[in-house]
């Protein structure tokens, strides 16, 4: 998923490739649904994404949990809050829907986005829409680490507003030695808190 590709993998991949001359890796950043599809059809050996659907033929090895944040312009009335944002605080706000936030099952959130007039899949597009005043959005914390200073990412009061990120593989398929080594390094980085 894009947040992992942009924030977690660059340093990890650089070190991994330095230690293994001749190894080539293709990094594809896309939403969880597309990652699942690419692993399922065999076009990639390993994906890093959110939870898989039961019966998909895929397995998930948990790596970390990533809490969602409310992303709004620094000039937004909520931007100066000192306490976490409740769902009720978002009544009347235009919520820009996105693939990452589909996993938020809190009823308060589902009611807010039920009639969302605007959705975007790409994090860069989401941030540009928020910057332009088209609304606010919810993104995983990792996706907000490198935001420009004209936006803020506020914690949410609902502890269930998070996503589990894991390594996605096909059931019953052995991984290559290179992929196995990469997964071990990835797990170690996640265990340390990257």
Image (spheres, grey):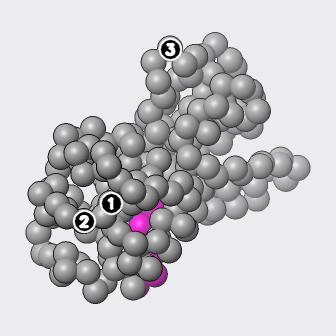
Please report the residue visible at 21 percent of the width from the left and 58 percent of the height from the top.
156
Cβ atoms under marks 2 and 1 closer than 8 Å: yes
Is 145 magenta? The answer is yes
Which residue in the structure is indicated by mark 1?
95
The residues colored magenta run 143-149
Residue 93 placement, left or right of 39: left
Please report the residue visible at 40 percent of the width from the left and 72 percent of the height from the top.
134
> Quick one: SS at disc 2?
loop
Image quadrant of residue 17? Answer: bottom right
Residue 117 placement, left or right of 106: right
Mark 1 burial class by Cα count in 10 Å: few <14, some 14-19, many 20+: many
Which residue in the structure is indicated by mark 3?
55
Task: For marks 3 and 2, give the CA distance.
Answer: 37 Å
Please report the residue visible at 56 percent of the width from the left and 46 percent of the height from the top.
31
**Residue 54, placed above or below residue 118:** above
Cβ atoms under marks 3 and 1 closer than 8 Å: no
**Looking at the rendered structure, which numbered label has been put on residue 93?**
2
Please report the residue visible at 76 percent of the width from the left and 33 percent of the height from the top.
43
Nearer to us of marks 3 and 2 is 2
Task: For marks 2 and 1, give the CA distance.
Answer: 6 Å
Mark 3 burial class by Cα count in 10 Å: few <14, some 14-19, many 20+: few
Q: Nearer the viewer, residue 83 or 180?
A: 83
**Residue 101, placed above or below residue 144:** above
**Residue 50, placed above or below residue 3:** above
Q: Nearer the viewer, residue 61 or 191?
A: 61
> Quick one: SS at disc 1?
strand
Q: Nearer the viewer, residue 135 or 31?
A: 135
Residue 27 placement, left or right of 31: right
Q: Main secondary structure of the magenta part?
A: loop
Is 174 magenta? The answer is no
């Amino acid at each position: 998923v894009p947040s992992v590709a942009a924030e977690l993998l660059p340093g990890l991949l650089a070190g991994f490739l330095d230690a293994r001359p001749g190894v080539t890796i293709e990094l594809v950043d896309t939403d969880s649904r597309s990652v699942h599809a690419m692993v399922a059809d065999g076009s990639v050996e390993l994906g890093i994404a959110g939870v898989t659907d039961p019966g998909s033929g895929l397995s998930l090895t948990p790596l970390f949990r990533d809490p969602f944040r409310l992303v709004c312009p620094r000039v937004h009335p909520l931007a100066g809050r000192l306490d976490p944002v409740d769902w009720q605080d978002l009544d009347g706000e235009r919520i820009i829907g996105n693939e990452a936030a589909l996993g938020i099952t809190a009823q308060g959130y589902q009611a807010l986005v039920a009639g969302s007039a605007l959705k975007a899949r790409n994090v860069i597009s989401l941030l540009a829409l928020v910057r332009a005043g088209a609304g606010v959005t919810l993104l995983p914390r990792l996706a907000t680490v490198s935001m420009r200073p004209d936006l803020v990412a506020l914690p949410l009061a609902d502890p269930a507003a998070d996503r589990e990120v894991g390594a996605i593989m096909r059931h019953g398929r052995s991984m290559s030695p290179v992929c196995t080594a990469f997964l071990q390094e990835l797990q170690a980085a996640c265990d340390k808190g990257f």
